[in-house]
Every structure is written in structure tokens, then in C-alpha cells.
Amino acid sequence: MTQKLSILGSTGSIGTQSLEIARKCGYEVSTLSAYSNVDLIEKQAREFKPKLVALADKDAALDLKGRLSDTDIKVLSGTEGLCECASFEGADTVINGIVGMAGLEPTLSAIDARKKIALANKETLVAGGKLVTESAKRKNVSILPVDSEHSAIFQCLQGKPSNKALKKIILTASGGPFFGKNKEQLKDIKPADAFNHPNWSMGQKITIDSATMMNKGLELIEAVWLFNVDPDMIDIVVHRESIVHSAVEYDDNAVIAQLGLPDMKIPIQYALTYPERIESPTEELDLTKIGNLSFYKPDTDTFKCIDICKKAIKKGGIAPAFANSANEQANLMFRNGQIGFLDIGDIVERVMQESPDIADYTLDDIHEADKLARELVKKYSEKR
Ligand code: NAD
Ligand code: MG
């Protein structure tokens, strides 16, 4: 089926891989949007000829408008511009590849406009899981996971006999570049060391989240919302080769896993073609070349972000949004050289002690919590 895509975050790792798939499958691209990369989005716009393009940064959008003045492409800016792209009536599917909770409002707009959503932006579900899932249910909108683990779980659940038969989700984690290291060895880690992920090539923020294992904590929360399971039903297992993308265990102890080479084009494409499958540009998996698959328990003492997230989702309400915002700020400050690597988990943990008690939150509550969490991260980082 020809699809008309709205690609949010088109200049990023997920966005550019989504465009590769659109190119290969001949999908129409109706809108493109990103933060501020004018050069790349101009190039993309000239190739894919969308109807609408938006940049969150207003000055960059103005620059882009000038550059595209010889075309019919409408250029928008700010969060409103992103939301207009997400709800554009000429598109049927929205791929959300924005990084961070900036992706939440566009997701809500896409749901309101009843688009099918291929969701890579996990922070959308971590920060606003209740708002997003309730509104998707109300509008009868499907949210298809793009995150490789969640795509794997979703694939393993196809043909599931009943909700009751699902015993456990086995969420795999690569362990990142610092697997096996202790706190002493991680004390002096610099951003450049952490950018060196063993298996995946991704944007900067998620690469640091993978190094701290916050990424797995965020994914645990993402899984709770996507699959409507209790957090205790999710086991995190370190799997160094990133071949088993996750698994589910049923009541009869049968475990079904999804395997493949670590390449995001498989889950992106599946979210678009579901329930069908078509040929992929990704190489075939040759298990004999891989040889061995290894599995370990995560070291949650050194990588404390996993437990912070688990606690937050168990507490519920605004707590996961608070943890997410604290991490977004701490992650950024580490990348800017303002705090150390281990400070990320320590500060987020400290900030979580001041998480507001709001069970039934609104979008405004999330924004307020976001502001407070970021201020607290700055405050506690000064004291270090
Ligand atoms: P990236 O940094 O490569 O790209 C992010 C995109 O979002 C860019 O186009 C950027 O311009 C845009 N963006 C950033 N801030 C924005 C803002 N405030 N408003 C609007 N747009 C903004 O990131 P990525 O690696 O592609 O990750 C995107 C999302 O997908 C993240 O939530 C990440 O956790 C998730 N994800 C990524 C991968 C991967 O392999 N890259 C895998 C699984 C999940
Ligand atoms: Mg993932």
C-alpha cells in the first residue's frame, strides 16, 4: 500500500533511516520536520518534495523559508509547526523520530488527527504514557513500536492466545560500552568514551542513555505503556551481541524471541508494513557467523538508572516524566562537560526524591515538572 508519511525528526538517525525506507518502498513523504539542521532538511525537501516542512528553531525556519522560496513547500516553525506536520491531513502515517520529550505534543496532535503512529520517540511514552495511551484508545489509533526491543516484543506477541497467557517480557540490553566496569573505572569517563557504542549507531542523547543504561530504564517504562503490563513482569537481561532483540515468555514456559542483525531499518519498516512483511535492505542474519550469544544479569548497582526508572513507574503519576526530564538535563550537561559520567545517575536519583505527587496529571503538569526537574539537576550539579 502506498503510504503518505509525516516524518518528525527527519534529520536524525531514525529520521534518515526512515527516509531510506521511504525511498526504497516508494512511499510518499508529505511532511518533514526537525530542530534546526537547515542544510540537511533543505536537501531532503528537494528530494522528497513534501507539502509541509517545519523546524522547531524559529531562526532556522526563517532561513529555510528563504532557501525554499523557489518551491511550493510551506515552511513552519516552533512546536505549533511540528504539531501541524504531525496532524497534516494529507498524511496517513506519522513516524516520530524526535529525541526527548519535545516529541510528546506532536504525538498527541497525531493521535488527535487519527494518524497511524510509528513511534521511536520513547520519551513520549515515558513522560506522557497515560495521556498518550488514553487518547489513542479514545481515538482508536494504533501506536506501532519502532524501538527495536519493543518491535521485537510486538512481533513475539503476534498470535498470542490471550492476555492471560503472557507471563514475562524479557527486555534485552546490549550493556553499552561500559559493560563489566565498576564505579572506580567509570569515574573519569569522558563524553567521547561514551559515544563509542559497541553495536548501534544512534543519536547523541540515546547513545549516552545506553552507556548509563537509563535507556533500558526508559524502555522498561515504554514497555509498560505499550503492552499494558506490570513493571515486575519485565526482566532486563544484558545480551552483548544485540542479536536477540527481546523475547516473551508464556505460561507454559515457552519463550519466543525475535532475532536479527542490529539495524533499525527492520523495526522501522515493520512498523510501516505491519501486519505484512516485505523485503528489507538489511543484510540477512547468519547465526554461524555470530557463533555465540551471551546473556548476563545487569549490574544495577553501578548502572543505577534502571532502578530509578523502575521505582518511578511503580510510583506512577508524574514520577516517570520527572525522571525523564531530570535525565534529559543531566545527559545534556554530561555531553557539555559540566558533570561527570557517574553524576548522571547520582543526580537523577537525588532529584527523584523531590518528585511531585501528582497522580492524574495533565500536559501542563508535565511541563511544570519538566521545568522543576531541570532546575533541580542544575542545583545539585553545582554542589558537586
Ligand atoms: P537524533 O539525535 O539522531 O535525531 C533527533 C531528531 O530530532 C533530529 O532530527 C533533531 O533535529 C530532532 N529534534 C531534536 N530536538 C528537537 C526539538 N526540540 N523539536 C523538534 N525536533 C527536535 O536521535 P535518534 O537517535 O534518531 O533518536 C530519536 C528517537 O528515537 C529518540 O527518542 C531515541 O530514543 C529513539 N530511538 C532511536 C534509535 C536509534 O537507533 N537511533 C533506536 C531506538 C529508539
Ligand atoms: Mg531500544
Image: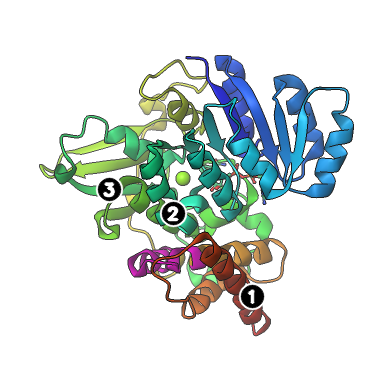
**Amino acid at the residue labelled 1:** Glu
User: What numbered label is drawn on residue 169?
Assistant: 3
What residue lies at 33% left-to-right and 37% top-to-bottom?
154
Q: Which numbered disc flags the more N-terminal residue, 1 or 3?
A: 3
Q: Residue furthest bottom?
A: 383
Q: Quadrant of residue 200?
A: top right
What residue lies at 51% left-to-right and 34% top-to-bottom?
264
**Magenta: predominant secondary structure element?**
helix
Pick the front one: 164 or 213 = 164
Q: Which numbered disc flags the more N-terminal residue, 3 or 2?
A: 2
Name the residue carrying label 1: 375
- Rendered location of residue 107, percent (x, y): 53, 44
Residue 238 visible in image: no
User: What numbered label is drawn on residue 131?
Assistant: 2
- Rendered location of residue 202, percent (x, y): 59, 43
**Amino acid at the residue labelled 3:** Ile
| Span of residues in magenta | 306-322
- Is 166 on the left-hand or right-hand side of 86? left
Residue 267 visible in image: yes
- Is 21 on the left-hand or right-hand side of 64? left
Q: Quick check: 151 above or below 135?
A: above
